[in-house]
Image: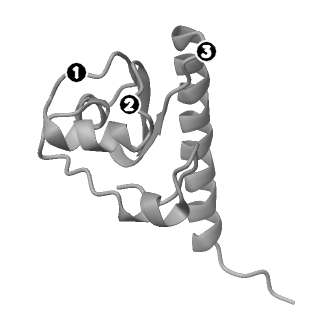
Amino acid sequence: MGHRGFGGTVSNDTVEAILLPLSTPSALRTAHDENRVFAGKPPDTGAVQTRFLRMFGAPREIIAAPVRLKERVVCLLFGSNPRADLARTADEVAAVARAMEEAYLRIIRDGKRPPPSS
């Protein structure tokens, strides 16, 4: 789903090469399928998620938040910060996800408007 990101030693090429199928159990799948913010210790769901998390330093706690257009999840935000209060950070990430939803809708609406006549 994702194609942009940053953090630590993760390069743009690495981010663009990430493939985490939503058919296998993971914290990202939970956020996607349950349409909610996942915040906490990542569940032990197997090698695919373990490799994904290792790219980000194998964080002990993570956040994954869905970005929706209507009821469809179109993007997932993922992050971790070992020095932050997880509950507060989850609220902040959820607010960013809502702002992204509003921005996507605004872009779509603006794209459907006829150009102004001169």
Q: Are marks 3 and 1 in contact (CB under 8 Å)?
A: no
- Whether residue 43 sits left or right of residue 77 in the image: it is left
Q: Which mark is residue 43?
A: 1
Identify the element where label 3 is drawn: loop
Q: Residues within 10 Å of mark 3 (few under 14, many from 20)?
A: few
Residue linked to disc 2: 58
- Asked if residue 13 shows in the view, the reply is yes
Residue at mark 3:
84
Q: Residues under labels 1 and 2: Cα distance?
A: 12 Å
The three-letter code of the residue at mark 2 reads Ala
**Residue 19's spot in the image, x, y percent?**
28, 57
Q: Kindly indicate the quadrant of the structure image that contains residue 38.
A: top left
Kindly tell me whether residue 71 is visible in this rendering.
Answer: no
Residue in the picture at 12% in, 42% down: 24
- Judged from the image, the secondary structure of the residue bearing numbered disc 1 is loop
Between disc 3 and disc 2, whose residue precedes? 2
* Residue located 51% across and 51% down the image: 10
As helix, strand or loop, the secondary structure at mark 2 comes to: loop
Viewport quadrant of the C terminus:
bottom right
Please identify the quadrant where the N terminus is shown: bottom left
Which residue is at the far bottom?
A: 118
Badge 1 or badge 2: first in the primary sequence: 1
In the rendering, at what x and y percent does residue 15 appear?
45, 58
Residue contact at pointers 1 and 2, CB within 8 angstroms: no
Residue 110 screen position, x and y as percent: 65, 66
User: Which one is nearer the viewer's eye here, 63 or 99?
Assistant: 63
Residue located 33% across and 16% down the image: 41
